Amino acid sequence: MHELSITQSVVDAVCRRAEGRTVHSVRVHIGALTAVVPEAMRFCFDLVTEGTVAAGARLDIDQRPGAGHCRGCGADIVLTDPVLLCPCGSADVEVTAGRELQIVSMEVG
Ligand SMILES: [Zn+2]
């Protein structure tokens, strides 16, 4: 379950930025190609935040579609999973979006 290590790094960053203040909510963008399961991440978030300033905080997850550019046929395609394959059959696809995992906002106070 790679969500645990990913969530740990998110919570570490959140706690550092909170600078001792209580964290009420955190919003993250997760690209479709990270293969992070939102339910698993929520579960890990509750575990990892225990005993930190983010304990009990709400986690909002926005899943972002992936995108790629096929070097074979030149098409820009939507990527919904980590299988990088253009409808033309080429696997020579350059990922342009979908691998991001960003903390976009957090509510502290
Ligand atoms: Zn193609």
Image: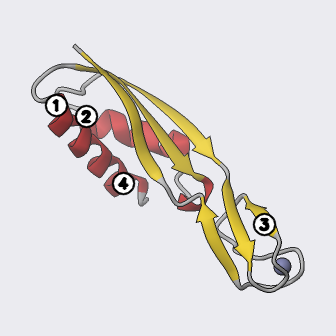
Query: In front here: 57 or 84?
Result: 84
- Does the residue at mark 1 contact the one at mark 2 (Cβ under 8 Å)? yes
Sequence-wise, which precedes: disc 3 or disc 1?
Answer: 1
Residue denoted by label 4: 6
Whether ligand 1 has any atom under 8 Å from the Cβ at mark 2 is answered as: no
* Residue 49 image label: 2
46 vs 71, left or right, is left
Sequence-wise, which precedes: disc 1 or disc 4?
Answer: 4
Ligand 1's quadrant is: bottom right
Type of the residue with mark 2: Thr
Type of the residue with mark 3: Asp
Q: Position of residue 10 (x, y in %)?
A: 31, 45
Sequence-wise, which precedes: disc 3 or disc 2?
Answer: 2
Q: CA gap, disc 4 to disc 3? A: 29 Å
Residue denoted by label 3: 76
Type of the residue with mark 1: Thr
